[in-house]
Image (cartoon, grey):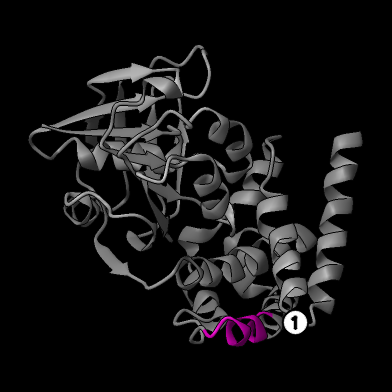
Amino acid sequence: MLKVSIIGLGSLGGFIAARLSSLPDIQIQWVYRTYSLRKDKQVLLTSSSMSEPLVGYADTISYNLEDVFGEIVFITTKAYDNSTLLEQTKTWKHKTIVLLQNGIGEDEKLAQGLAPNNAIVSAITHLKASYTTSPYQVTLHNQLIDCIYAVYQGQPSSYLDYLLNNIFNDVERESSSYHVRLPKLLISFAANAASFLYDSDMRGLATNPKCRELMLEIEQEFLPLFNALNLPAPTFPIYKLISLLDAPLYENAYFSMKEDSDNGRQVEFEEIFKASQKLANQYNVPFILGHQVCQHINNILQGENLS
């Protein structure tokens, strides 16, 4: 029986848990990061396109990363948790770890602390979901149920493709983690920047001329990074994102950083904004607007912290 562990039971982790539960001969472990009031062993996955919820179950739950038993491990926590998470993964051996996060450079950090007999898979998705607890429910807000991944290190489990193709509707393998992560980093940077600076929901990014202009200008600063890394131009450029977001279902929905900030949660500032600056500096790519945006958003976040 294949054993699978999921670390991080939020919207993405719950989505994976629900989709996995429909597969036979899999033992599923949910791993919560801390001892907390949450003891959920069931999740309901809902969306406007589903006639009834999909129910996902945990065969077992754990609060200790050293107890992770999965041959394949999905990490769906926010990237800012990685510094403490990685300290607790040093005992892992012969696992395939799917790092399903935004940001860039976290795969390298994970590899530095792990035994080399573990495989690391860099992955992203464009699905948008939210979750509630008590009861635990995940709501899908779009149908971009995709996964783009690359093998960062080692030889993954022979079951990896089977799992990914049953969790996601569209799966694409790329040749490097930069091929996977840089296009998503561009979207995360541009969309969250406009959301913060103009206090905009996702539809507002398409309908507000200032939001559109800012995102398109940020894209122009990112494109030299693609050239510097010998990557092809993004297949999902900003104008396509704008066209997609111009729909009523994206009203009152927000990209993850703005959503987290509005709800008083920690945001992935270092992993998205600072990491973009660092990458541009590393490859001597001019990033004038990007630096200005980072400073503005840092000021907003610091103001919130002081209030």
Instruction: Choose between 172 and 202: the one closer to the eye.
Output: 172
Tell me what residue is drawn at x 91 percent, y 35 percent. Answer: 306
Residue 105 position, x and y percent, is: 59, 57
The quarter of the picture where the C terminus appears is top right
Location of residue 172 (image quadrant)? bottom left
Say if 36 sits above or below 68 in the image.
Answer: above
Residue 199 visible? The answer is no
Q: Which residues are magenta?
A: 222-230
Residue 110 position, x and y percent, is: 52, 45
The quarter of the picture where the N terminus appears is top left
Numbered label tally = 1
SS at circle 1: loop
Q: Would you say the magenta stretch is mainly helix, strand or loop?
A: helix
Tell me what residue is drawn at x 26 percent, y 24 percent. Answer: 58
Residue 198 position, x and y percent, is: 77, 63
Q: Is residue 59 left or right of residue 255?
A: left
Instruction: Choose between 280 and 108: the one closer to the eye.
Output: 108
Residue behind mark 1? 285
In the rendered image, residue 269 lying in the magenta stretch gets the answer no
Tell me what residue is drawn at x 33 percent, y 42 percent. Answer: 15
In the rendered image, residue 226 lying in the magenta stretch gets the answer yes
Location of residue 295 (image quadrant)? bottom right
